[in-house]
Amino acid sequence: MDLTLKIWRQKDAQSEGRFVTYQVTDISPDMSFLEMLDVLNEDLIRKGEDPVAFDHDCREGICGACGLYINGRAHGPLKGTTTCQLHMRHFRDGDTIVVEPWRAGPFPVIKDLVVDRSALDRILRAGGYISVNTGSAPEANSIPVPKEAADEAFDAATCIGCGACVAACKNASAMLFVAAKVSHLSLLPQGQVEKRQRVLRMVAQMDEEGFGNCTNTYACEAECPKEISVSHIARMNREYLAALLTSGK
Amino acid sequence: MNTIRALFTVSVGKKIVMGLTGLFLCLFLLVHLSGNLLLFKHDGGAAFNEYSAFMSTSWVIRIMEFVLLFGFAFHIVEGVVLTIQNRRARPHRYALNDASSNSDWTSRTMFVTGSIVFVFLVVHLNTFFVRHRFLHVQETMYDSVVHAFQRGWNGWYWAFYVVAMVLLAFHLHHGFQSAFQSLGLNHKRYTPLIKKLGLLFAIIVPAGFASMPIYFHFQQFVK
């Protein structure tokens, strides 16, 4: 396959960025999107040019490091797929592909296609945990968890924190990410103790980071590589209202 | 945090206010439409005039007018604030964004459809409410309706109403079901039902309102 790539190049957070057009040839349809970019980068290095910076780690769709805005879609055109699991057979020979970084105020560009997603980490630090004593794992049968709750919590826990929900949302809202964490912990017995303060703190941190407000377009659910449901956002809304009415301050 | 302040400053709180006021305004639309259906009674407007006299004198309705005013005010102000904040959350926009493949366009145009409905609201209040309540015009409400829809704005006033109702339909198509989600009411069994109900509401209520200008405008030609 021969392709034309229009890639966002930006030296650092302070510099102005711009699109640069590259040609790549002899791309195998079996390559992943990131492998195709590897081919481009090897070519650039050989020519003595600066390779395109992009985030990647496991390359098997489970770490959440990769994330590119490909032809106007977060993680490209496929549903429930990370950029590393998107293969070139889903494009056609001769295609022009536009590649941009996630765009959101709280996700400043570090270089080229790499953005700083530590805002999501700070939200987790605000309440995405349970305070338990360390030690050996407790006996599993001593804490009964209903099957439905376990399944629902697990669906929320599949969030890999890639930020596609923020990238795809027209408001750059992080509600699906935050809701997945709130929902995951509030469904399980271990999460009950800090349930109320968790939702208040995580939502407050989300607002402080400058993420937008949710307007229920559900673009997040459609673009989430783990297909996490917006029903978790509804649960967060319920939890928030309950916490607000009972926080006693 | 103070509960009331959180409802107006925190992202999730603002959603709750938008949802609550939105559903309240949906309820108002139903009441307003059912009363206005008296226009179709073939009695020269007697029933409709009696109804409009009741609406302007009853103290219950007077109190509800203020509740309604606050409902509109909060919904509109929050809507504008949310729109500004949401635009600021993405200072650098995408060069290429294929939003149509991940979301419904009515959900992305709430500010536009809402703004046009607001313009309609001002025009509508000015034509009927202000003239009767504050300027005390010497004609029945029924006659005002007939005149406005037959000859208002050189015969085009009715068309403005119809266009505004189409936009209201788009606004309600997203707004009705979205309000339930914002209030945390999402359930595997009931949410599909709420979405269907929302679609029905978004078609029937604006269509009901639009039928009035259409009926009175074209009635003058078939006599």
Image (tube, rainbow, N blue to C red):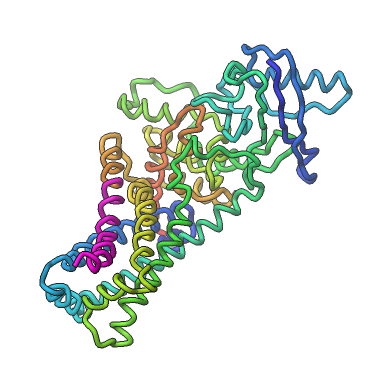
In this rendering, position of residue B97 left or right of residue B113: right
Q: Nearer the viewer, residue B154 or A237?
A: B154
In the displayed structure, B28 sits above or below A89; it is: below
Q: Main secondary structure of the magenta part?
A: helix
Could one spot residue A106 in this view of the protein?
no
Q: Nearer the viewer, residue B126 or A65?
A: B126
Q: Which region shows up in magenta?
A: B199-223
- Assess whether residue B213 is covered by the magenta stretch: yes
Locate the C terminus of chain B by quadrant: bottom left
In the image, residue A180 lies at what x, y percent? 46, 36
Q: Report which quarter residue B121 is drawn in.
A: bottom left
Q: How many marks?
A: 0
In the image, residue A177 lies at what x, y percent? 50, 38
Instruction: Tell me which residue sits at (54%, 48%) in the image.
Output: A171
Q: Nearer the viewer, residue A140 or A82?
A: A82
In the displayed structure, B24 sits above or below A231; it is: below
Instruction: Tell me which residue sits at (31%, 51%) in the image.
Output: B202
In this rendering, position of residue A141 left or right of residue A95: left
In the displayed structure, A207 sits above or below A139; it is: below
In this rendering, position of residue B156 left or right of residue A51: left
Q: Report which quarter residue B212 is drawn in.
A: bottom left
Could one spot residue B191 in this view of the protein?
yes
Q: Residue furthest right?
A: A48
Instruction: Tell me which residue sits at (46%, 39%) in the image.
Output: B103
- Assess whether residue A39 is covered by the magenta stretch: no
In the image, residue A67 lies at what x, y percent? 62, 30
Q: Report which quarter residue B181 is drawn in.
A: top left
